[in-house]
Image (spheres, rainbow, N blue to C red):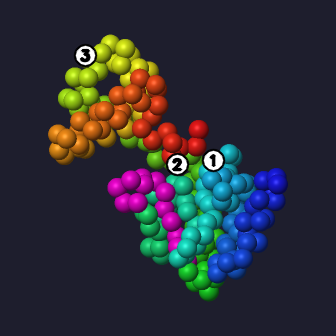
Amino acid sequence: MDKAAKIEAYFEKDGPFREGLALLREIVLKAEVEETLKWGSPVYTHNNQNVLGVMAFKQHFGLWFFNGVFLSDPLGVLENVQEGKTKAMRHWKFTSAAEIDPRAVQAYVAEAVENARKGLKLEPSPRKSLVIPEALKTALKANPTLEKAFQALAPYKQKDFAEYIGTAKREATREQRMAKILPMIREGIGLNDKYRKC
C-alpha cells in the first residue's frame, strides 16, 4: 500500500471520531500544506517542514502543532501534553465534530503555516554534560577495554546507563544493575535497545 492509500485508510477507518477527523482534514487541506504520513498519522508540511498533524486517540482527536509554542492561541485551546518535556509542540483536542469551529481552526492553521514560512522553530536546549556515577566510573577506570567500549557507545546509550546506575537508591540494587549492564557495555548493546526499532 502506497503512502496516499495509507492516508486514505487512516481517515476511512471506522471509529467514533471519523467525522471529526474528516472535517479537520478538509479544513487543513485548504492551507498551503502538503499531506504526508509520518509516525503512522497524517502530517502536514510546508516547504518540507512539519507544521501540524491530525490524530485520533482513545478519548479524543485533534490537531498537534509542531511549533505551536509560537501560536498566539486567542481561544486558549492549546495544551502542552507533557509539561516539562514537550517544548514546542501544542495540541488542540476535540471529543466530537460538533466542537469544531472551521473558521477558528483555519485561522490557527494559517498562523502555523505563516510561522513555518518565517522559519520560526524552537531551538533545542544545549545538552547537559554526562554525569557518570561513581560506581560506573570506578568500573570503567578499572578495565580499559570496558572504558573503550563505553566511549564507543552513542551518547544517548551512555546517558541511559549512567541514569540507570545513578537512580539506584540502595547499594544492593546498584550492584545488581552493575552486574546487568557491564556485559551489555562490552557487547555495545544499549540498555533499551530491545525496545527501540533498530
Q: Amino acid at mark 1?
A: Gln
Q: The residue tagged with tag 3: helix, strand or loop?
A: helix
Q: Is residue 26 left or right of residue 87?
A: right
Residue 142: which numbered mark, if any?
Answer: 3
Q: Residues within 10 Å of mark 3 (few under 14, many from 20)?
A: few
Distance (Cα) linking label 1 and label 3? 48 Å
Q: Residues within 10 Å of mark 1 (few under 14, many from 20)?
A: some
**Percent position (x, y) of residue 170?**
17, 44
Residue 197: which numbered mark, if any?
Answer: none
- Residue 74 shown in magenta: no
Most distant residue in the top direction:
144
* Location of mark 2 (residue): 120
Q: Nearer the viewer, mark 1 or mark 3?
A: 3
Q: The residue tagged with tag 1: helix, strand or loop?
A: strand
Front in this rendered view, residue 176 or 156: 176
Q: Is residue 141 left or right of residue 72?
A: left
